[in-house]
Image: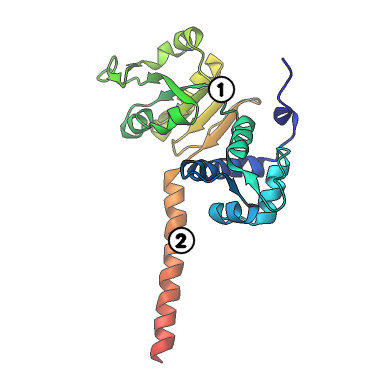
Amino acid sequence: MTADPVLRREIPDATVARLPEYLRTLSALADDGVPSVSSEELAAAVGVRSAQLRKDLSHLGSYGVRGVGYDVAMLALEISRALGLTVDWPVAIVGMGNLGRALSSYSGFVTKGFRIVALFDDDPSVEGEDVLGTAIRPLRDLPRSHAADPIAIGVIATPASAAQTVCNALVQAGITSILNFAPAVLTVPAGVDVRRVDLSIELQILAFHAQRRTVASADLRSAVTR
């Protein structure tokens, strides 16, 4: 089988980080029945400069048509292929507290090419519990589960104190793509990819911007009343 030419290209990490935003916007346009979109319209919807968007898409070999723009369905497919979303990715979630349960119930995983195949938690009180057709198993069962139904991505939804232990177990089982929701920095060997999602950091950033707006508004009111 000939390798996908998209996969042979070196795509910058910054571009990869923006591709899901482009895909989400294109999917919304497709749902609305929009057949084509200009680079300016797509860039504005995503919140980037049109020149940046065109540069990003050029890494996929997609340049649009002058006066017409990009074919929405075709561009969505090209981005999906580049992100690896045209195949089914089996996912395991470790940590079945509130966050883990919310993630395991998220319907968006299925529509985006991700399939929850295993759930793990070492709390004896939840062992064997069925969550949408998948039983919660103890972490010691991870190697056996991975051997029977290979896991492509491991999701850590545990407290910070357990995150490194869980990460080690995932790596030892042969899982090299990890999404970490725990507020902890993980140490992994070369060849293992870790993406960290820290909700508290995102909230702190939002608080910073909210504070700036509040101060600016107060300054404006003060200037008006002088």
**Mark 2: secondary structure:** helix
| Residue appearing at x 42%, y 63% in the figure | 210
Residue at the left extreme of this rendering: 125
- Asked if marks 2 and 1 touch (Cβ < 8 Å), the reply is no
Point out the tag, 2 or 1, that comes first from the N-terminus.
Answer: 1
**Mark 1: secondary structure:** loop
Q: Amino acid at mark 1?
A: Val
Q: Amino acid at mark 2?
A: Phe
**Which mark's residue is nearer the viewer, 2 or 1?**
1
Residue 118 at x, y = what percent?
Answer: 41, 18
Q: CA distance from mark 2 to mark 1?
A: 39 Å
Which quadrant holds the C terminus?
Answer: bottom left
Nearer to us in this view, 112 or 198? 112
Q: What label sits on residue 114 in the rendered view?
A: none
Colour scheme:
rainbow
Left or right of 152? Residue 213 is left
Image-quadrant location for residue 8? top right
Left or right of 167? Residue 103 is left
Q: Which residue is disc 2 drawn over?
A: 208
- Label 2 crowding class (10 Å Cα cut-off): few <14, some 14-19, many 20+? few
Q: What label sits on residue 87 in the rendered view?
A: 1
Placement of 154 over or under 18, stated as above or below: above
Left or right of 194? Residue 105 is left
| Residue appearing at x 46%, y 50% in the figure | 202
Residue 116 at x, y = what percent?
Answer: 42, 22
Count all numbered tags in the image, as a single digit.
2
Residue 135 at x, y = what percent?
Answer: 33, 16
Nearer to us in this view, 102 or 78? 78
Image-quadrant location for residue 175? top right
Which quadrant holds the N terminus?
Answer: top right
- Label 1 crowding class (10 Å Cα cut-off): few <14, some 14-19, many 20+? few
Placement of 166 over or under 1, stated as above or below: below
